[in-house]
Amino acid sequence: MIEYELHLPLTLDSDIRNLMANAYGALLHEKERGVTGYYTLPEESMLLVQELINEHTFAPFDAIALYGIGGSSLGTKAIDAALRPIRQAKNIVYFENPDPRTIESNYRKLAGKEVLHVVISKSGRTIETLSQFKASLAYFGLDPKKDAKRLAVISDVDSQLHRFAEEFGIKSFAIPHNVGGRFSVLSAVGIVPLTLAGYDTAAILMAAQEMMERFWAMHEEHILQKAVFIARNWHRYPMNVLFSYADSLENFNKWYVQLWGESLGKIDRTGQRVGPTPIGHIGAVDQHSFLQLLMQGPKDKTVTFIKVEDFGMDAKIPDLKLPYLTSSDFVNDVSFATLIDAECDATKDALLHEGVPVDIITLPRLDEAALGELVVYYELLTSAVGALLEIDTYDQPGVELGKKILRERFADA
Amino acid sequence: MIEYELHLPLTLDSDIRNLMANAYGALLHEKERGVTGYYTLPEESMLLVQELINEHTFAPFDAIALYGIGGSSLGTKAIDAALRPIRQAKNIVYFENPDPRTIESNYRKLAGKEVLHVVISKSGRTIETLSQFKASLAYFGLDPKKDAKRLAVISDVDSQLHRFAEEFGIKSFAIPHNVGGRFSVLSAVGIVPLTLAGYDTAAILMAAQEMMERFWAMHEEHILQKAVFIARNWHRYPMNVLFSYADSLENFNKWYVQLWGESLGKIDRTGQRVGPTPIGHIGAVDQHSFLQLLMQGPKDKTVTFIKVEDFGMDAKIPDLKLPYLTSSDFVNDVSFATLIDAECDATKDALLHEGVPVDIITLPRLDEAALGELVVYYELLTSAVGALLEIDTYDQPGVELGKKILRERFADA
């Protein structure tokens, strides 16, 4: 199990305890009233994994083309990127940004492969996703009817995309009404492509479910404690930096940025604009980029470290003494995993010395269990902060104006 | 040439004009006194390019292993990533983070190649860089003396790393004393690996030199104007988001984050902690992640857009009408380049509507000329903001404590 260590200036007095209880109560209310459906996904999606394992609808494939953006891709990508270095899985090629160079490069990656095309959009209307899907139909010469077995759709059952799938006999998976994109990685949105690629999604869901149960049993109170600290202090600390000490967590950082940014950047019920800004960094590399600002810049950030105890590799720095290069000999015969961990600890200590509020999330290994738990940890934390800020954590009204302007631009043309 | 468009609430009255003149004067002073040497790099490095083109020291190679972190890798990586989609160049494999999984993956990428190993460290002491270089010597069975032609060093001429190179007859390139890592991409640090990889670095330097000359001739005053706005308003807008609308600019964003973060996150001469926080995002994809927060969260951010006018590709969304999927037909027969550009414009308009201070950097193409100019633009902007904040833009004292703690940890063990 993951270890959570808080170094936050917060005294657990009765005020704080009350706020923690309020947040817990608010989440329980959300769960019971179905305000959001993500709380029950780990259990529900187990059935989906079984169904997928016995699924014989699809033509044989050796790569997945995933059409999706934001909540429809970030969670899958986070887990895919973190597990790929240690597992065998079919390649997933992501059609997210409509950057023409990326699209071209994706086509090169898929050349000569048998491809399953998976189109993911909760609303069924996402412009980037539908456009790239249509381009691929043309590029690969696919006919929705004849090639239905090479296609899959993941969408709200009320969407036009779902109707399109039905029309052509394309296998369609449902995203529950009350699960928004950024909370959907443990729904069909993430579980279908990850299972089809060959990952052990049952293990992810099991760890997610266990974390959920421990939270409801009040055995993960640190989540509420951190949530109270962030909700009460976001004016003073308007930024939270997630400093993850493993290259393969870069996409997890991006998932966190979306989860936090879209959920917590809101106008509250008094009309005030609220929300801390999420920032992702990778250690140790970004110590050479962002640490100076953390150490000597304004004290406007909290910092969360993720570290990995066991990389499953003991590659060592050789015990090699080279003339003139003795300054690095103090890590001779030390494993790189030990070095990167020690760098995380040293950076944490340096920040604590400067009085920066810090917390540390230690993963025993970067595996299915850690990812399942970490996803639920961040979802619950986000919900708790949202409840304490008294905002609607689950909508995103701020993105509509840009979409409207985009449509108008083309209507004018 | 790049176009710069400012939508900042700033009236060009005499106060502002005075501040702009002060900043200009401070930079001129820095240049003339050699406070920093980056102002003359575009000119100086032209000679280096000539030398490299006629260089026959090295054994033949078809890939470069680059050992460097922070300022020793980010600039090279930014240019490499931006140009690679449109140019032929030898592969550069980056040994930055001491993540054991990445090191293993790097070795796989280099398997069966003739490799030139380039070790870059200004101080010559960087722990991550020396450790990985030593590991590679062991892994590839290289002997510094016998295999000197497969090695190159880029460092300060006073460093121990430079002495190591001399000892073994390894070709060594100098980083000027007064050029720090994050301002060094146009010195040997970036120019050597990029030229050896086959990029047209002369074209990059030419555009950089032209930008430098235009700035000194007072033809790029918008830089000073933006610098004044940022320096005067960083309390009100503690964050600047660089929203780049091209996937291949993600590493440029990271270079910007280091340049800005390490240069401007400082204790000023009155003892106050100052500095706006740099944040990098990629459009249109991060509209689905960060836009909600920008639109409805606290008004604590300025936003800079980078857009590319011509992607050099006219791949189109097909004129395909599918049943039920009509909501995206308004972009049928539109190129993806037009779509992504229109998304940038629509997002900019939406943010302006919310009163967010915005500026737009429009690159005609993502090529050598654009990158050379853009690098100098950001360096000058950073120096100007630093001068106005009355800080030392070029040091980074805040990173020393972590290094000290790291050494002590191993000394204790």
Image (cartoon, coloured by chain):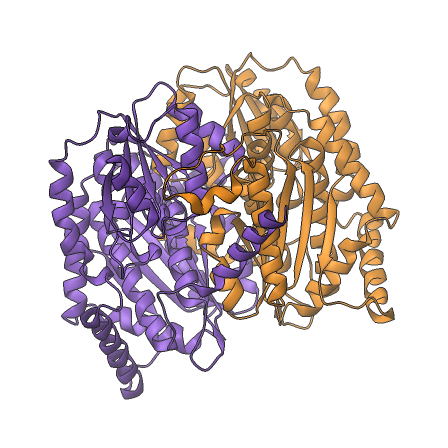
Chain colours: A orange, B purple
Q: Residue visible at 77% across and 60% down? A: A225
Nearer to me, B297 or A178: B297
Q: Where is residue B94 in the image (x, y as percent from the top left)?
A: 39, 37
**Nearest the eye: A398 or B160:** B160
Q: Where is residue B165 in the image (x, y as percent from the top left)?
A: 28, 40
Residue B141 place in picture, x, y as percent = 39, 23
Task: From the viewer's perspective, tell me whether residue B163 is left or right of residue B106.
Answer: left
- Residue A137 visible in the displayed image: no
Horizontal side of A374 relative to A12 (left or right) equals: left
Residue A171 image position (x, y, % from top left) = 62, 22
The reply to whether residue B133 is in sight is yes
Residue A95 vertical position relative to residue A239 in the rendered view, above or below: above
Quarter in which the C terminus of chain B is drawn: top right
Q: Who is closer to the viewer here, B118 or B201?
A: B118
**Quadrant assignment for the N terminus of chain B:** bottom left
Q: Please report the residue visible at 65 percent of the width from the left and 12 percent of the height from the top.
A: A56
Determine whether A70 is above or below B182 in the image: above
- Describe residue B298's horizontal placement relative to residue B119 as left or right: right
Relative height, residue A151 to residue A341 (above, below) = above
Q: Quadrant of residue A195?
A: top right
Q: Residue furthest bottom?
A: B14
Q: Number of marks in the image? A: 0
Residue at screen point 87% across, 50% down:
A218
Left or right position of B144 against A379: left
Depth check: B185 or A251 in front? B185
Residue A371's quadrant in the figure? top right
